[in-house]
Image (cartoon, rainbow, N blue to C red):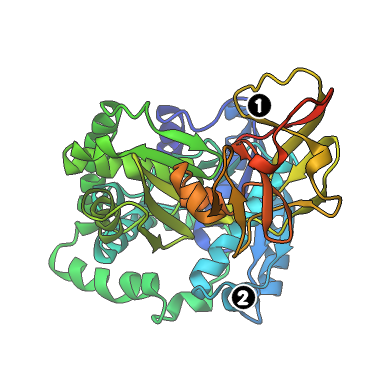
Amino acid sequence: MQNVLNFIKENKLIVPGERIGVGVSGGSDSMALVHILHSLRDELDIDVIAICVDHGIREESRDEANFVVEKCKEMGVRAYKFRIDAPKLAKEKNVSLETAAREGRYGVFNSLFKKDVVDKIALAHHMSDQAETILMHIFRGSGVSGARGMDPERDGHFIRPLLNTSKQEIMQYVSQNSIDYVSDSSNDDNSFSRNYLRNVIIPQIESKWPNVVGSIVAFGGAVREDEDYINSQIFDDAVIYDEKEAKIPLSYFVYPPSIISRIIIKVLKNIGIKCDFERKHILLIRSLATELENGKKISLPFNVVAIKEYDYLTLVNKEKETVEFCAENRCGEILVPPNKKLVVKRVKDFTQKSGSVIFDYRKVPKTAKWRFRQEGDVFTKFGGGTKKLKSFLIDKKIPQRKRDFIPVLADGNEVFVVAGIEISDKVKVENVPTAFSVEFEV
């Protein structure tokens, strides 16, 4: 237990007064962790809460969740249990059962943060888990960032107090303190990649090199130190962020591969992509930026799309995609999915400001509506000349990913106003006391 306490203090994992939720499955590791933190509650000045998530994978999982609640009650620890349907999630999202269970579990954890039930979640990953994670990343084809393994703290919310504790030390603690636990039968199913690594591959390696787990973890620690230093020397101030998308200047791609690859990984995390990308995907992004022509795009794992557009390489988290939009032409604020707004005002001052356009609403058919662009839309340019709206937006160098989400005021396929960009020559203001001003940030 002293080893765990030292690790918590060295890495500043816990702040006095925090409510620490502990992810408890009922296995030896998590039961030991909740017992250790509960024993340290006065010294650390924390409140400990057990969180048990039943993934709905096995018949006995309900009984195991009840076991956790009962045993935590005996310890004097408050416990909550939740149930998710991981098999159903896996089918709906077309992902592996392991991935669905993990996503569902973290969904529960994140809901507890939002409801202010806990400040942090402690996870029971230990040294062997760390070694397995490093090997899994290497086997999968990750770069150096994957070889660093798990960090003691992630996102300021998730902590791993046992990361420097061996499985043997955990089992010794369990025995000495007579801690009851359950064995998960799914841990013996070697069809799961991690189980195969844990039950087959690592034991074979240990038969030749007994200290392999410690050596792998030490390697990961060395990689982490180098990685942290290199990342501290990277400057990416010119990257432009807009919620779940980011624009990386193409000029950055003259940097050495080790630098631009780290910038890409950092940008992905900043737009909400927490999963580790494989090295081959980073190479695809770099090739798109340096070798392919403007307008090309590639689809990547984890709902990411990379697009080369003019002077930038744009990465988009596709969860940003929106729904259909239609609204009356009226004064006031009009909500534009997913979270923008169109502001229409009646004005007497016809001075056009940045991000706004002014048009004569009397010249617009009463049947015109605000909507997103459609196939076949045409636009009469200010000053004359009709073009397809698509061609007009290309001429204006509007990025492809934004073209579908710019409100247009149209009647049928004739567009009279492109919000935030231009008005049709047919609705220009001429000798009228008032007009409509439209504000929209493209």
Other-residue count near label 1 (Cα within 10 Å), few / some / many at <14 / 14–19 / ≥20: few
Residue at image point 84% right, 55% down: 367
* Element on which disc 1 rests: loop
Q: Is residue 324 above or below residue 157?
A: below
According to the picture, the residue beneath numbered tag 1 turns out to be 17
- Rendered location of residue 306, percent (x, y): 39, 54
Q: Nearer the viewer, residue 195 or 283?
A: 283
State the quadrant of the C terminus: top right
Label total for image: 2
Residue at image point 63% right, 69% down: 55
Residue type of the residue flagged with mark 1: Gly
Q: CA distance from mark 1 to mark 2?
A: 40 Å
Residue 92's tag is: 2
Q: Nearer the viewer, residue 256 or 289?
A: 289
Name which of mark 1 and mark 2 comes first in the sequence. 1
- Rendered location of residue 277, percent (x, y): 35, 56
- Rendered location of residue 262, percent (x, y): 29, 41
Residue type of the residue flagged with mark 2: Glu
- Rendered location of residue 50, percent (x, y): 67, 50
